[in-house]
Amino acid sequence: MINLTIDHKPVVVSKGTTILKAASSIGIDIPTLCYMKLDDMNIENKPGGCRVCVVEVKGRRNLAPACCTEATEGMEINTHSIRAINARRTIVELILSDHPADCLICAKSGNCDLQNMAHHLGIRKIHYQGEQSLYREDTSPAIIREINKCIMCRRCETMCNEVQTVGVLSAVNRGFQAVVAPAFEMNLDHSTCTYCGQCVAVCPTGALTEADETGAVIRALSDPTKTVVVQTAPAVRAALGEEFGMPAGTLVTGKMVAALRRLGFDYVFDTDFAADLTIMEEGTELLSRLSAFMEGDKNVKLPILTSCCPAWVKFFEHHFPELKDIPSTARSPQQMFGSVAKTYFADKIGVKRENLVVVSIMPCLAKKYESSRPEFSVNGNPDVDFALSTRELGHLINLGNIDFNSLPNEEFDQPLGESTGAAVIFGTTGGVIEAAVRTAYEIFTGNPLPRVDFEELRGMDGLRKATIDFNGTEINIGIAHGLGNARKLLEDIQAGNSEFHAIEIMSCPGGCIGGGGQPYHHGDAEILKKRQRAIYSEDKNKNIRKSHENPYITKLYEEFLGAPMSEKAHHLLHTKYFD
Ligand code: HC1
Ligand code: SF4
């Protein structure tokens, strides 16, 4: 063990502990900018690049960056000496000297770590004149890169390379021109970016933000010729409250519905309804593949992989194209909703497809990209017109001068607003497969489930597995969240070593509750766990907790679709993948 003092307080730490962690263990916060720790994943970004965390170590001539200097025996550290504070101020001034000063109109204003740091250090004047690097803006359907604002903290690079193993982002150029960018500085939409948005979630400045569609939604809401329908994803209700100062894990389903109504949406519906529909289609597909397998069909594709996460879909299209027949062909709930809204519902209310606007509220940035995929449109009219993030909805509510905290709880409209507990849990890792098991078990065995909760499928470990007994038939289930974890399961499938019959994959750590469009959570796993608990409590409180018992889903099949995997269902609710 190592004994040292920090700000005159004795501390004992194990060998290899950094000064930053040693200080934090006794409640001393050292300011950081590039440093990032992802709880639960054992991943740290500590390039020691920004030097904001410098501290004074007695007997050393130079200040030491706390994030990457190991504590050693007998060290005497002063974290906030005048010298350390002055150095921090100079460093931040130097960063600001080549940073665009457009805080007034920056998408990250109010949430920018650099802005907060400048404020914290009391910087009122920039004494240096840096060279403003002028990069083009890179726009994609989901993510905007304003590279002038890159401060080379390299957090995005760590997310993309180490957590997601996508490897799109890395440092290029030198000096004032140094930035993090795709290879050859190509645009994101020419790269293999999945639009998972995890780089956006950790970017400390406005260099990476979502493609903001709030203006387009406001225009649709003010157009008297349009009927505007909104759907809300399962994970949004467990996080939106954070945008209004509520503690993480506060469920705001009813207030969210009320706010959307006050914003002027004509119908407030629930993506959860379509999640129940997804289970009907995906569960039927799982059972048909399982039956074929049990009857000895050697060509049957197992394991079946869930397909509702668009970043995950883009990941396997780029990186595992030879596995493209393995995922379920079921479209995601977002897209099933759009398809049903613009056919069945538009017919019901007598509105032409082109006059019906479908807006989704999603925790995810890849949903923006998914809705723009050409296969999800009819004659150029998309099934889902706009996909706003949870953060964008928070902004719209503020713009509409709606006092969110004092709103009453309101109910979704019908018929596309009814959902079961099974649909709600789609919003967290393991939830899609648990929902599928609840339905598949009853259909497969013909018996009621002995229990609804499958605790063995829950949790936050990046890779999980469980065996569920379908009345004597053992079904092996795998779960991965984070694309790096998904890659491991896919490599097993490629090598013919997969033990699973079904696998759920979600791109974002935690599943959709940790999506790239959620309120910023700075890698804090506790926030994700609170959101997860909120999701499971909403499930528990639902009267109906199995997708096949949703009466409006039964009605949809009776009135319109026929049966799961019918020709019409195939046409409207399934898709194909590309290599
Ligand atoms: Fe998700 Fe899904 S759960 S993908 O995470 O299958 O975004 O919340 O809406 O479509 O339902 C996201 C969440 C979401 C879809 C559903
Ligand atoms: Fe990488 Fe995801 Fe960011 Fe794309 S969106 S650059 S895949 S982290």
Image: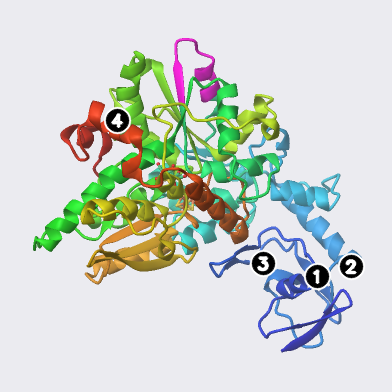
Residue under numbered circle 4: 555
Real-space Cα separation, disc 2 to disc 4, in angstroms: 70 Å
Tell which circle, 2 or 3, labels the residue nearer the N-terminal end. 3
Mark 1 residue CB less than 8 A from any atom of ligand 2: no
Towards the viewer: 415 or 235 = 415
In this rendering, position of residue 418 left or right of residue 255: left
527 above or below 67? above
Dot 2 amino acid type: Ser
Disc nearer the start of the sequence (2/4):
2
**Amino acid marked by disc 3:** Gly
Please say if 115 is above or below 510: above
Mark sitting earlier along the chain (1/3): 3
**SS for callout 1:** strand
Quarter, ligand 1: top left
Amino acid type, mark 4:
Lys
Q: Quadrant of residue 56?
A: bottom right
The mark nearer the N terminus, 2 or 1, is 1
Separation of residues labelled 2 and 1 (CA atoms): 8 Å
Q: Earlier in the sequence, mark 3 or mark 4?
A: 3
Residue 411 falls left or right of residue 242: left
Residue that numbered label 2 is attached to: 81
How many residues crowd around disc 2 within 10 Å: few (fewer than 14), some, or many (20 or more)? Answer: few
| Residue wearing tag 1 | 55
Which residue is under mark 3? 48
Q: Position of residue 166 (x, y in %)?
A: 42, 57
| Most distant residue in the top direction | 224
Which range is magenta?
216-229
Badge 3 marks a residue whose secondary structure is: loop
Q: Is residue 36 magenta?
A: no
Q: Residues within 10 Å of mark 1 (few under 14, many from 20)?
A: many
Asked whether residue 396 is in view, the answer is yes
The reply, left or right, for residue 469 in relation to residue 416 is left
